[in-house]
Image (cartoon, helix red, strand yellow):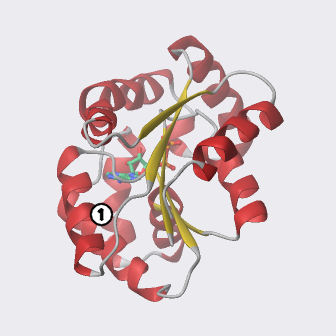
Amino acid sequence: MINLVLFGPPGAGKGTQSEKIIAKYGFVHLSTGDLFRKHLSEGTELGLLAKKYMNEGNLVPDEVVIKMVGEKIKENPSASGVIFDGFPRTVPQAQALDALLASMGQSISGMVGLEVPEEELKIRIRKRGETSGRADDQEEEKINNRIKVYNEETIPVANFYAAQKKYHPVQGVGEIETIFNAICSAIDSFPN
Ligand code: ADP
């Protein structure tokens, strides 16, 4: 059982690389951004709650995210692996995930961090905004806020896993296939 945290700023390519990882390893994809967007489109209570945070590029409160992830993990008890994408995004979320996995006799196998310069991220997100229909991809101010939130609240999560010797940085600029190969090398080095 592999528990992979796929880490990186907004626009780093986590979604693209997740698809390739799923195709190769058959892992289950747990993207908190996708889950919130699904709730939003279905108009659930959780979706309504998350909407105001998401549209401004702010984080949804930890307790809400942790509860949603906890329920989702339990839906897939027999998966060969899970990709956590967009989660944990704060240190309290990382601590909650560690505790949750420990209660199931599991742990995080490793974190792969896609590293992309800020200017490149802004270009990618603006481009995605032309077709994604995502409110948070459209305006300069919202894009900048997401990057600011990432720098302030999410970067510490990389340090959290680095302290456990689980952080594997991968250069996120270049050919998609080259980046994917680097990710595979990291995954293949995880203890089973
Ligand atoms: P991005 O492309 O910015 O990485 P995601 O699709 O992962 O975006 O998430 C979109 C939005 O959903 C975030 O800006 C945030 O409002 C909310 N969100 C997603 N995951 C989390 C999380 N783990 N904690 C808090 N908020 C989250």
User: Is ligand 1 within 8 Å of the beta carbon of the residue shown at mark 1?
Assistant: yes
Residue 109 vs residue 81: left or right?
Answer: left
Residue drawn at (35%, 82%) of the image = 71
Residue drawn at (40%, 32%) of the image = 146
Q: Position of residue 181 (x, y in %)?
A: 75, 39
Give the residue at the far top of this rendering. Answer: 119
Residue drawn at (34%, 65%) of the image = 107
Task: Work out whether residue 34 or residue 85 is closer to the camera in this orientation and state it.
Answer: 85
Q: Residues within 10 Å of mark 1 (few under 14, many from 20)?
A: many
Task: Work out whether residue 64 or residue 179 is closer to the camera in this orientation and state it.
Answer: 179
Task: Work out whether residue 18 or residue 51 is closer to the camera in this orientation and state it.
Answer: 18
What residue is disc 1 on?
Answer: 65
Residue drawn at (64%, 49%) of the image = 15
Residue 90 vs residue 27: left or right?
Answer: left
The answer, for residue 94, to whether it is visible in the render is yes
The answer, for residue 61, to whether it is visible in the render is no
Q: Position of residue 80 (x, y in %)?
A: 59, 76
The vertical placement of 66 against 161, above or below, is below
Type of amino acid at the residue the image marks with label 1 = Val
User: Judging from the image, what secondary structure is the residue with disc 1 in?
Assistant: helix
- Could you say which quadrant of the image residue 186 lies in? top right
- Could you say which quadrant of the image residue 152 lies in? top left
- Report the label total: 1
Q: Position of residue 30 (x, y in %)?
A: 51, 66
Residue 95 vs residue 182: left or right?
Answer: left
The vertical placement of 59 against 177, above or below, is below
Task: Work out whether residue 161 or residue 90 is closer to the camera in this orientation and state it.
Answer: 161
